[in-house]
Image: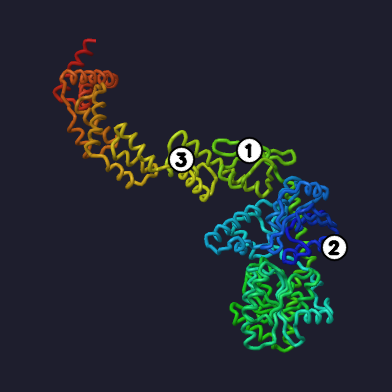
Amino acid sequence: MRIGMFTDAYTPDINGVVSSIVTLKNALEKEGHEVYVITTKSSASKDLVEERVLRLAGIELDSFYGYVLTSPIHLSALDKIKKMNLDVIHVHTEFGVGIFARIVSSRLSIPLVSTYHTMYEDYTHYVNIFNLKSVDRVAKRAVYSLSKLYGEKCTALICPSPKTKERLEAYGIKKQIHVIPTGLDLERFEPEKTDEETRLALRKEMGVKDDEFLLVYVGRIAAEKSIDIVIETFTIIKKLQKKIRLAIVGGGPQLDELRQMAKNLDVEDYVVFTDRKPHTMIPSYYHASDAFVSASLSETQGMTFIEALASGLVVFARPDDVLTDLVLENETGFLFTTKEEFADKLIAFSEMNKADKEKMYQNAIKKVEIYDSRVFGQTVLNVYQQAIDMYQKVYDIQALRMKDDMIEMLLSSQGDELKVTITWDLYLEKKYHINAKIMPKELEELLVHEKYAKAYLQCIRKIASKDRTRKEMYDFLTNETELDIKSINEIIEKLEKKGYINDAQYMISQIEAMRALKVGNHKIVRTLVKKGIPQETVENELANEDHEEEVARGVKWAQKQLDKPTDSSMKMQKVSLQKKLYQQGYETETVNEIMSLLEFEKDEDVEHTNLMKQAQKAWKRYCQKYEGTKLRNTVFRYLVSKGFDYDDVYNAVEEVEQEYDKD
């Protein structure tokens, strides 16, 4: 397999990321794989090509301890990388070279594996020079957003510890995160790899006598490492006149500041600064020491802790999640929270008998056996293969088009085409564009989201044809889609936020519409409550209208009913009108008021005409079934039931009977 490792930091720099990359590179090469490193160099001149190492021109930033800032675009380097025929890209940084790695992955269609080494939120002090809370909040928000963006846009994501995984998940990264502790070439750190002569020479070089206890810190000299806490502790050591010395091995932006601090605290005779040392010499500095210390709480895994333990050193550290299984109290090291506690434990260990110390040294070496680089290399290889397999199923975005407030994406993969509809919000959030890659897992999520998007689109169409209430749309989504409750609530909230659903406005418009149709308040309340509007809310709105206005509305509607032609009796018309007023939504008292305001002048001619029409219809209907007295009585009872007077009915029956007898 041909692997391209992209990193901002590489040898001869010394830090945890470099150690991780070198260890992985060596482990992979031992298994016969070809590893190319694409990194930076502190010069703006042309790129430099070494043996399988491509160094990109950049500018060194002094305030970031040798960090080389390079452009994310290197066209000439892109051609060189293309000739490497890489099977997979493994990026170890998020910026500079990291951005370039993502461009290369996209341009050359190579799967991208990313390892998240650094807790950037612990480094925001570099841009917050005035220590302002507002600046720190903005910087941390930027870290969250960028970490999520870069984490989601790789084929596979690796982190070195459960602590880092939890932080990434808190950022909102939903894809699978592989937890792979960084391995070490444990043989390099075996104590016997440094001979006694070299060990004594290094101690002499640092001004440490044979009978003095040497505590060592190895790593970057920067604020997030909290080295100041360790130095301050030596004011206690000095007062107690203990033969303990501190060696700080490494360089960094805080080096001069800490040197001055040691001088100001008058402990410069107890603290020695070595500045940068060659990578190959680091194990010997561990071996020349008696214990290791780091007060840092910003580690993603803590490679120097593992190196120290592998070197047979007891570790002093502050409690941190990454050390849960590494630093065990009185077994492989000691934990402290204050300078006083640190000083007490350090002195106690320095004065411990040789046998007990040796037991802890052996515990330390045994504790890190699981970090063997061969296991590390094989585990990462498995992730590479998964990424390659996934990438072969990757889809490219071929086209994007607007469709009813949605985005329709045309996806293509090895001749297969697929259309997926997503919401505009998701499109903006993901920043999709033509030729962007859609991984298999992301496609699964998009297909789930498509159900959401289509349901949302159906809601828009329903509302476009007719205004709907929140309850109506909720019932529709519940009964007509397969969405879960969470998705349904999200759609409803989105529709409300965009103003597509507005129950208050809907209620007012419906009240106006029903009043225009002369509907009574009782029916208005009943109708709107069924639509999901709270009864109290409707009644409060209706209370703005005077009762007289409702009565007047009812009178107008009732008068129209009276003006319609009818062959019913006046009495029956009144009964029928009352019933219709109830049906129209007017309450009993209001109906009585309306009826009292109507003019029911009995027109004798009209009443007689209606009676005769009814009598003729009844006689014609019943004469087929009855005759004689029974026929007359049946017609009589029918006409009385229709509200006509007895005397008028009697006369009408006789008149109709005579007409039919003549026939």
**Can you identify the residue that label 3 sits on?**
500
Label 1 secondary element: strand
Q: Which is nearer the N-term, disc 1 or disc 2? A: 2
Q: Which is nearer the N-term, disc 1 or disc 3? A: 1
Q: Quadrant of the C terminus?
A: top left
Q: Position of residue 639 (x, y in %)?
A: 21, 24
Q: Quadrant of the N terminus?
A: bottom right
Residue at 63 percent of width and 52 percent of height:
149
How far apart, in angstroms, are the residues tagged by discs 2 and 3?
63 Å
Frontmost residue, 455 versus 505: 505
Q: Mark 1: few, some, or many residues within 10 Å (few <14, many ≥20)?
A: some
**Can you identify the residue that label 1 sits on?**
400
Frontmost residue, 187 versus 447: 187
Q: Which is nearer the N-term, disc 2 or disc 3? A: 2
Residue at 39 percent of width and 42 percent of height:
531
How far apart, in angstroms, are the residues tagged by discs 1 and 2?
46 Å
Q: Is 499 located above or below residue 657 in the figure?
A: below
How far apart, in angstroms, are the residues tagged by discs 1 and 3?
25 Å
